[in-house]
Image (spheres, grey):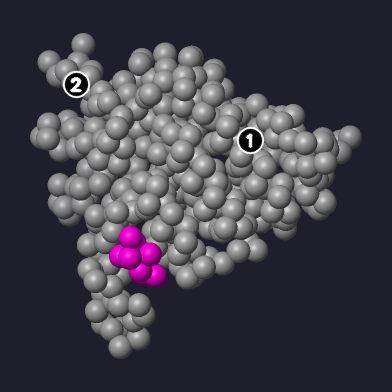
Amino acid sequence: MAKIWANSGDSHFLEPDDLWRSNLPRRLAELVPRAEKDPDGRWETVHVDGQSFRRRLPSQIQSEFREAGNRPPGARDAGLRLKDLDAEGIWNEVVFPSLGLWAATFRTPEVLHAAMQVSNDWAVDNIMEKSPRLVPTAQVSTLSIEDAVSELQRAAGMGFRCVFMPTKPHPRQDDYHQASWEPFWAAAEEANMVLAFHIGTDPIDQTNERVGITYRGPGGAVLNYTETTFSGQRAAMKLVASGALDRHPDLKVLISEGGASWVPFLGDRMLEGYRQHAMAVRPKLSRSPKEILYTQVWASFQHDASAVSALTAEGYQNVMFGSDYPHLEGTFGHTQDTLRDLFDGVPDQVRDRITVGAFQELFPDTAPPPASTTT
Ligand code: MN
């Protein structure tokens, strides 16, 4: 049977639910997120760092959805995970955290600092050291840039090769296009750390009754799903337009799960703005925004047929497959079918760039997968 081996730019690991609570000193452990359900089971109060907010609990449909997405036992266990990866034909994969979703609700820099350290130490023991095929992302505070720099450097020393960046920083911090982030970009370039943004990770809006839900009513499911992709494009746009990537030409960015054909589109839009509004453009860039986007930003996708033509028709080389294991949006259970469909009639060279080469370029010290077999 033919098998297409692919690297993946997108997967997730579920940490133990009590990871922070059981590893922080008691004084700080009291401040990490804790949810209390109402007796009627419809609402909950979440206590985080001295704040409490009310949240409507997921409906039956939403609960089933979430459960289905996290069902594979490899979501929590690296050994079982590797068996799934072998069966699916995934070799190396970038592994994002799950608890980190809460990071933007902390107010005390010291608690966030300690929580990120615990998560990074845990990821080394439970993901990185389990297999060289698993490439976990480090986590840093986006509340304190100084802290982010020091934890990034510590993580690089521990062997991390990429750092998870939420698509927008902590609500109390400047946005990514501001000059205050410059020390962090410089440190990431110096440490050779890939900035790994995952779509849909703008800070949780605590005033929203239902996390992650922007639209209700007709079309809601598709609207909410599609909406999440724009956050990744905005992050890339800020790093290009502000000159951060231009000043740091060795800094590399991965935008995971958001498709790839947006890159040629966004490059064209930014180029037009840069050229036609030249009198207002600050800072000037040494290369065109489209070139910066094309050469320093990698983009992972799961099923999108248009991602392949972003390379073949638009010349965007950094198109990368991502299985999004173990989530529902991903290809778990049908990865080989997806890969066969995507690359049916596509030259091997293009297939290999998208399934293997783009990832190897981003993480050159990982070993490439076995050769794909086609019969
Ligand atoms: Mn994902």
Residue 315 picture location, percent across and down: 16, 52
- Cα–Cα gap, marks 1 and 2: 38 Å
Q: Is residue 344 visible?
A: yes
| Residue 31 placement, left or right of 78 | right
260 vs 15: above or below: below
Dot 1 falls on a residue whose secondary structure is helix
74 vs 330: above or below: above
Given the image, on which type of amino acid does mark 2 rest? Ser
Residue 140 picture location, percent across and down: 56, 47
For the residue with label 1, is its CB less than 8 Å from the closest atom of ligand 1? no
| Residue 108 placement, left or right of 197 | right
Q: Is residue 213 visible?
A: no
- Asked which quadrant contains residue 125, the reply is top right
| Residue 61 placement, left or right of 7 | right
- Asked which quadrant contains residue 283, the reply is bottom left
Residue 87 picture location, percent across and down: 36, 15
Residue that badge 2 annotates: 372
Q: Residue at x 46, y 19 (%)?
A: 130
User: Which quarter of the rendering shows the N terminus?
Assistant: top left
Between 335 and 158, the one lying in front of the other is 158
Q: Residue at x 25, y 23 (%)?
A: 369
Q: Which mark is residue 118?
A: 1
Dot 2 falls on a residue whose secondary structure is loop
Between 303 and 125, the one lying in front of the other is 125
Nearest to the eye among marks 1 and 2: give it: 1
Given the image, on which type of amino acid does mark 1 rest? Val
Magenta highlight range: 241-248
For the residue with label 2, is its CB less than 8 Å from the closest atom of ligand 1? no
The 10 Å Cα crowd at callout 2, few under 14, some 14 to 19, many 20 or more, is: some
